[in-house]
Image (spheres, helix red, strand yellow):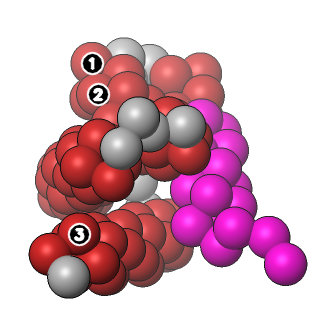
Amino acid sequence: MGNIVKEKSFAFSVIIVKTCQKLQSEQKEYVLSKQLLRSGTAIGALIREAEYAESKKDFVHKFGIAQKEANETLYWLELLQATDYISITTFDTLHHAATELLKLITSIIKTTKAHINN
C-alpha cells in the first residue's frame, strides 16, 4: 500500500504545474501563476522532506509548513478564479484537491502530536 498523502500531493503538483503552464502560455499571466506554482508544489516537497525528518517534532514542523502552503494555495486559486484567470470548473477541481490535501495534512499533524504527547 502506498503513502496516500505523498501520492495525492505529487498528483496535485502535476496539475498545478500544468495549470500554471496554461496560464502563462495562453493568458500571459506570470505573477499570480508563479505564486500558485510555488505554493502548490511546495506541499508535496515538504511532505517528501518529512519522510526523513530527524524527529517526530521535525516531522510535525515540516507538515505544519505544508499545511500553510496548502492554505496559501487556496488563496491563490480563489484570487485567480475571482479575477477570471481560471474557470469555475478548474477552480472547483483544484480547490477540492487542495482542500482534501489540507484535511489530510491537518489530520496527520493532530495524530502525530497525540502520539508525541503520550
**Pick the front one: 15 or 42:** 42
Q: Amino acid at mark 1?
A: Val
Distance in Å between CA atoms under marks 2 and 1: 7 Å
Which residue bears the numbered disc 2? 35
* Residue in the image at 20% along x and 82% along y: 118
Q: Position of residue 104 (x, y in %)?
A: 41, 77
Which residue bears the numbered disc 1? 31
Which of the two discs, 2 and 1, sits closer to the camera?
Answer: 2
* Secondary element type, mark 1: helix
Q: Are marks 2 and 1 in contact (CB under 8 Å)?
A: yes
Q: Is residue 14 above or below residue 35?
A: below
Q: Which residues are magenta?
A: 1-19
* Residue in the image at 54% along x and 37% along y: 52
Crowd tier of the residue under label 3, counting other residues whose Cα lies within 10 Å: few below 14, some 14–19, many 20 or above = few
Report the label total. 3
Q: Is residue 103 left or right of residue 65?
A: right
Distance in Å between CA atoms under marks 3 and 1: 40 Å
Which of the two discs, 3 and 1, sits closer to the camera?
Answer: 3
